Image: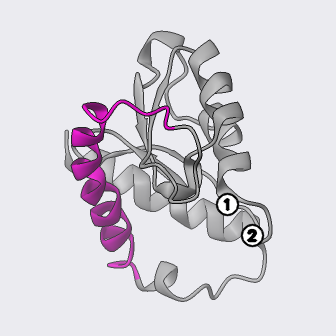
Amino acid sequence: MAMVDRSGLPLAIDLESASPHESTLLEQLLHRSFLRRAVDRPRFLIGDKAYDSDPLDARLARKGITLIAPQRSNRKVFTQDLRHLRRYKRRWKVERFFSWLFNFRKLVTRYEFHASNFLGFLHLACAIFLLKRL
């Protein structure tokens, strides 16, 4: 999982197995942020339909973060203000970040046996992206 800013630069990255749902791992990703100060936390998080959850909205609202995710098709009560969904169009920047990661051959196919080694290479790639923007 990754969290990027409005220009597509990485703010947090985390590695987890494929079995837990992404919405349960979101708060863990916020704790792994590269930004240490609370004032640097994002005010808005954009996610796909899988993040549309009332308990997740409530937990993030306590931290001062607004979750922007389209409503699931089976939702009975609509809670999302449609004006915020205009920001959902910016989700392509996250996808662009993952395409940048695939420029590194070591990250396209996971050759590393240990997850900590692979996460180290992910952090190295993120450091390269950040250093290129200086």
Residue 50 location in percent, x, y? Answer: 57, 57
Q: Is residue 13 above or below residue 20?
A: above
At 71% across and 32% down in the image, what residue appears? 55
Residue 11, quarter of picture: top left
Which residue is pictured at 49% across the width and 32% down the height?
79
Observer-nearest of 19 and 87: 87
* 13 in relation to 68, above or below: below
Q: CA distance from mark 1 to mark 2?
A: 8 Å
Picture layout, residue 29 above or below residue 94: above
Residue type at the position of mark 1: Leu
CB of mark 1 within 8 Å of CB of mark 2?
A: yes
Q: Which quadrant is home to the N terminus?
A: bottom right
**Numbered tag placed on residue 15 in the rendering:** 1
Say left or right for 21 vs 102. Answer: right
Q: Main secondary structure of the magenta part?
A: helix
Q: Is residue 21 magenta-colored?
A: no
Q: Which residues make up the magenta segment?
A: 78-104
Mark 1 or 2 closer to N-term?
A: 1
Could you tell whether 93 is left or right of 27 in the image? left
Q: Would you say residue 63 is visible in this rendering? A: yes
Q: Residues within 10 Å of mark 2 (few under 14, many from 20)?
A: few
Three-letter amino acid code at disc 2? Ala
Residue 74 placed where, x, y %? 58, 58
